Amino acid sequence: MAIISLLIHNGEADFNPIKKKNNATSGNISTKLAKLKSAGYIDVIKTFRNNYPLTLSRIIPKGITAFENYVEAIKTYIEPETDQ
């Protein structure tokens, strides 16, 4: 969920900052991005900037919803239940 949380915060991110922030290999990040794209959570846009390849990942609504659901599920484990 680290990539998703980064994209939630920034909206989109270049491949290299994602790689650096996650302290991961290119292959590892490529695999994770492919899985997130396959799940319909992100768009991956491949283009060029100054004649160099540029891979941008952008969060899409389904990814935002999945992240929000994940956060709510985690909260049920860390927030104490209240008796009513």
Image (cartoon, grey):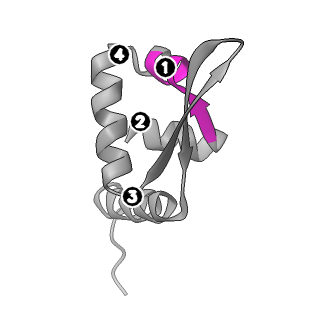
The mark closer to the camera, 3 or 1, is 3
Residue 2, label in figure: 2
Q: How far apart are marks 1 and 4 (CA)?
A: 12 Å
The local secondary structure at tag 2 comes to helix
Q: How far apart are marks 3 and 1 (CA)?
A: 22 Å
Q: Distance between the residues labelled 3 and 2?
A: 16 Å
Q: How far apart are marks 2 and 1 (CA)?
A: 9 Å
Q: How far apart are marks 3 and 4 (CA)?
A: 21 Å
Q: Mark 3 points at which residue?
A: 40
Q: Residues within 10 Å of mark 2 (few under 14, many from 20)?
A: few
- Name which quarter of the figure residue 56 lies in: top right
Magenta region's main secondary structure? helix
| Boundaries of the magenta span | 12-19
Q: Mark 1 points at which residue?
A: 21
The reply to whether discs 3 and 1 touch (Cβ–Cβ < 8 Å) is no
Asked if residue 15 is among those painted magenta in the image, a careful observer would answer yes
Whole-percent x and y of residue 7?
Answer: 55, 41
Going from N to C along the chain, the mark reached first, 4 or 2, is 2
- Name which quarter of the figure residue 9 lies in: top right
- Rendered position, 71 above or below 53: below
Q: Type of residue at label 3?
A: Gly
Q: Mark 4 points at which residue?
A: 26
Q: How crowded is mark 3: few (under 14 residues within 10 Å), some or many (20 or more)?
A: some
Name the residue rendered at 32%, 39% in the picture: 34
Going from N to C along the chain, the mark reached first, 3 or 1, is 1
The reply to whether discs 2 and 1 touch (Cβ–Cβ < 8 Å) is yes
The local secondary structure at tag 4 comes to helix
Whole-percent x and y of residue 13?
Answer: 59, 32
Say which quadrant the N terminus sits in: top left
In the rendered image, the residue lying farthest to the bottom is 84
Name the residue rendered at 61%, 39% in the picture: 12
